[in-house]
Amino acid sequence: MSPELEEALDRIARAPRLLVGLDFDGTLAPFQLDPSSSRATPESMAAVHRLLRLPDTVVAFVSGRALGSLAEVAEAPPGTVLVGSHGLETRLGDGTTAPIGLDDTQRAALVELDERLSALAAGTPGAWVERKPSSVSLHTRGVEDADLAEALEEQARAAAGDPAAADDSATDTCRVDVLGGKRVVELAVLRGDKGRALSRLRAQVRADAVFYAGDDTTDERAFRSLVPGDVGVHVGDGPTAAAHSVPGIEAVPTVLERLAGARERTRPTSP
C-alpha cells in the first residue's frame, strides 16, 4: 500500500458519516467460471464485519449482478446495503427494496436480445448467457480460444445496434445500453450506472464522504462520481479514474483493515 493511500484512508476515516462502497466480483471475491460459486475471501469479509460494527459507517456491495444473485453469493451481514444490476436494484440495510419496472417495449426488446445472445453462445463451449431483470449478458470467460471469445463479444455488441433493438424515434423500439466488462458484454434495456447509484446512495444515507473500491470498467463510473474528500481505489492494473490503485484482490483486505483500524481510533466500536 502506498503512503499516499495510507494517508487518504486515515483522512477519510475521520468523516462523521462514512459510506464504504465495494464492488463484489474481482474486488471482494475472486472470479469463478461458475458465478454462483463466487464468495468473498474470508479476509475481506472479516474486514467488512469490522467496518459494520462501527457507528455512522454504512457498507454497500455495488455489483452488476442481479440483486437476487448478489444476495445469494454475498452472504452479506445484516445491515449491509446491496446494490444490483449496476444500480437499478437496491436493498437497503433495513431490507426495503425497489423493483425494476419495464414497459412493454422494453420487455419485448429484452426477449429479443436474449434470443440473439443465446444463439451466439449456442455451440460454443464455455460461452453462456446471464439473464437479469433489465439486461442480458454474454459471458466468454470460459471460452478457451481468445480470438473466438473476442469475435463473440463483438457480435454481441453488434446485436445492440440492430434496427429492431436500437434507439430511434419509433414507438416500438427502445434504447439498448452496451456495458463492457472483463470477458462479458451486457446489453441493457434500462440503463444502470454505478456512479449514479453511488451518488444516490450517498444522499440516502447522508454520508459526508465515500470510499469506493472496484476492479472493472463499470466501476469507472463510480470513480468518476466521487468528489473531493472521497477516496477511490482501483483493484488491478490498467488506466483508471481512481486516485489510488492496488495490485489485485489479495490487497483489498489490507486496505479495508487499515480503514477500519483508523476509524476505530476516532469512533468507538458498537457492542
Image: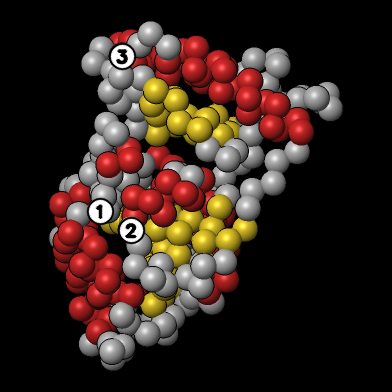
Q: Residue at x 60, y 38 (%)?
A: 134
Tags 1 and 2 touching, CB below 8 Å: yes
Distance from Cα at disc 1 to Cα at disc 2? 9 Å
Q: Is residue 232 visible?
A: no
Say whether disc 1 or disc 2 marks the residue closer to the N-terminus: 1
The residue that disc 3 covers is 125
Q: Amino acid at mark 3?
A: Pro
User: In the drawing, does residue 90 fall left or right of residue 106?
Assistant: left
User: Which residue is nearer to you in this view: 231 or 124?
Assistant: 124
Distance from Cα at disc 3 to Cα at disc 2? 30 Å
User: What percent of the width, then of the height, locates residue 119?
Assistant: 50, 12
The residue that disc 1 covers is 40
Q: Residue at x 56, y 23 (%)?
A: 114
Q: Is residue 144 visible?
A: yes
The residue that disc 2 covers is 75
Q: Secondary structure at mark 3?
A: loop
Say whether disc 3 or disc 1 marks the residue closer to the N-terminus: 1
Q: Residue at x 18, y 59 (%)?
A: 42
User: In the drawing, does residue 203 fall left or right of residue 24?
Assistant: right
- Up the image or down, 57 lies above or below 145; here it is below
User: Which residue is nearer to you in this view: 160 or 244?
Assistant: 160
**Quadrant that contains the N terminus:** bottom left
User: Which residue is nearer to you in this view: 185 or 13?
Assistant: 185
Foreground label between 1 and 2: 2
